[in-house]
């Protein structure tokens, strides 16, 4: 738990997320079996492990046999290292000037993409008197137009890396812009550019041990571009990406959601037909209605756009949201749920015997992506590890 999360206890406000580390470990094994022993998974645990808790997730993955982790920043990498995790940790977004010494001191593996990155690392390595070469992964831009060295600039950078007595090019990688579109010609183009980048490096005498392009969708559905490392994130947390194109229905792995989000009913009232509910009064009871209040709102990362069309699970029944979601509270219509009482458990993300609401359903209804739902779960929702 982060320090912010630790401040809150389930005994204070009934709004918490249960994270099953056993499910995370099982999902890791599903992914690892799928790609086979020739491909090393770099388990992506950035953004607090997609909201699941980076330290607990890193430890669980290490115990499950993971061999490589990927974070977004030096700060995240240091937190994982200081928690005792021994695995190589790739800092995928690179590093900022001033971070090079802590990065090396914590034995993190930086992504690099510029001459400045190389110079900063060399200087820090010399100052620290490092006796081993620093493993780095070079990021190449093949079409995402986000980070990475371009194919045009690559020969110069490759020559510079080849000359460096401090740097060892352990990996080369790139990122796909639409891996979930299974017949995308653009992905094919990115793959070709990536192969050209590997050839340019070979021309400079550089043969990185790891070459990687694949995120979850490509890990699941595109073996032709796996190379020898893949970077799955979302699948580890139990979600497949909704793929498009031929074979999309088969592009799923049997992974199970790791996180369940729960709350309890804190107030109940009966209202007459015509009664308006909540801010802006844009929901009205059309029949004698039983309303329940749950202590969850957009301040917890429960999207306000679920006000229309959102639903939760109460006692193995679906209950629709009634009225606009507020910052801290939400009203639900429990008229059709038999025997509801104060204190009853409510599932915001989870499954009961006959009902299921996944983070993917929330995303669809809120007009966003599952990543944003998981990463958006606020720190004030304590994560309980089960
Ligand atoms: C560079 C990089 N690699 C891998 C991933 C993992 O992606 P996914 O969660 O789709 O597997 C991400 C996530 O955005 C990323 O930015």
Image: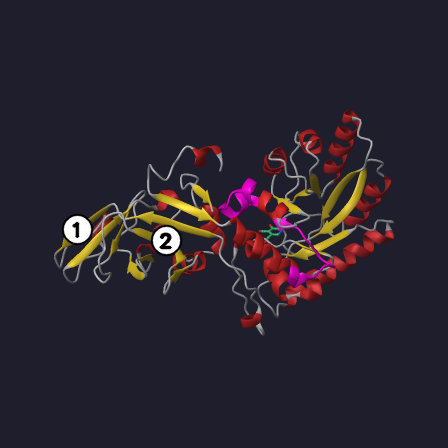
Above or below, comparing residue 161 to residue 31 in the picture: above
Identity of the residue drawn at 85% across and 36% down: 165
Between residues 224 and 382, which one lies in front from this camera angle? 382
**Mark 1 highlights which residue?**
269
SS category of the residue bearing label 1: strand
Q: Is residue 1 left or right of residue 76?
A: left
SS category of the residue bearing label 2: strand
**Mark 2 highlights which residue?**
348
Quarter of the image where one finds residue 103: top right
The span picked out in magenta is: 33-57
Outermost residue toward the top in this view: 127
Asked whether mark 1 lies closer than 8 Å to ligand 1, one says no
Q: Position of residue 80 (x, y in %)?
A: 60, 38
Q: Is residue 210 left or right of residue 102?
A: right
Identity of the residue drawn at 44% across and 56% down: 359
Quarter of the image where one finds residue 288: bottom left
The residues bearing labels 2 and 1 have C-alpha atoms spaced at a distance of: 20 Å
């Amino acid at each position: 738990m982060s320090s912010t999360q630790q401040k809150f206890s389930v005994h204070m406000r009934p709004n918490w997320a249960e994270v099953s580390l056993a499910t995370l470990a099982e999902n890791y094994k599903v992914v690892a079996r799928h790609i086979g022993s020739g491909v090393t998974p770099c388990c992506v645990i950035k953004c607090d492990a997609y909201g699941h808790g980076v330290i607990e997730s890193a430890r669980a993955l290490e115990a499950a046999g993971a061999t490589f982790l990927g974070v977004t920043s030096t700060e995240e990498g240091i937190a994982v290292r200081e928690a005792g995790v021994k695995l190589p940790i790739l800092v995928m977004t690179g590093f900022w000037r001033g971070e090079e010494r802590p990065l090396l001191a914590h034995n993190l593996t930086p992504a690099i993409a510029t001459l400045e990155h190389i110079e900063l690392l060399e200087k820090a390595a010399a100052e620290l008197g490092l006796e081993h070469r620093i493993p780095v992964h070079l990021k190449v831009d093949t079409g995402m137009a986000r980070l990475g060295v371009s194919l045009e600039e690559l020969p110069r950078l490759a020559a510079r890396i080849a000359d460096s007595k401090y740097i060892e090019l352990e990996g080369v990688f790139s990122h796909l812009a639409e891996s979930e579109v299974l017949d995308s010609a653009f992905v094919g183009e990115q793959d070709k550019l990536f192969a050209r980048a590997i050839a340019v490096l070979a021309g400079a005498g550089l043969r990185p041990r790891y070459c990687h392009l694949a995120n979850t969708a490509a890990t699941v559905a595109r073996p032709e571009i796996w190379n020898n490392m893949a970077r799955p994130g979302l699948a580890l947390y139990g979600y497949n990406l909704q793929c498009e194109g031929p074979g999309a229905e088969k592009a799923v792995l049997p992974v199970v959601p790791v996180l369940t989000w729960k709350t309890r009913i804190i107030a109940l009232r009966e209202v007459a037909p015509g009664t308006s509910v909540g801010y802006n009064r844009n929901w009205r009871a059309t029949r004698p209605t039983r309303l329940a209040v749950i202590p969850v709102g957009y301040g917890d990362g429960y999207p306000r756009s679920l006000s229309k069309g959102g639903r939760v699970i109460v006692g193995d029944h679906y209950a629709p949201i009634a009225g606009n979601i507020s910052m801290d509270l939400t009203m639900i219509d429990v008229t059709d749920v038999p025997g509801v009482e104060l204190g009853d458990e409510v599932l915001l993300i989870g499954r009961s015997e006959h009902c299921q609401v996944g983070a993917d359903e929330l995303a669809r209804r809120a007009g966003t992506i599952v990543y944003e739902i998981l990463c958006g779960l606020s720190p004030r929702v304590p994560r309980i590890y089960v």
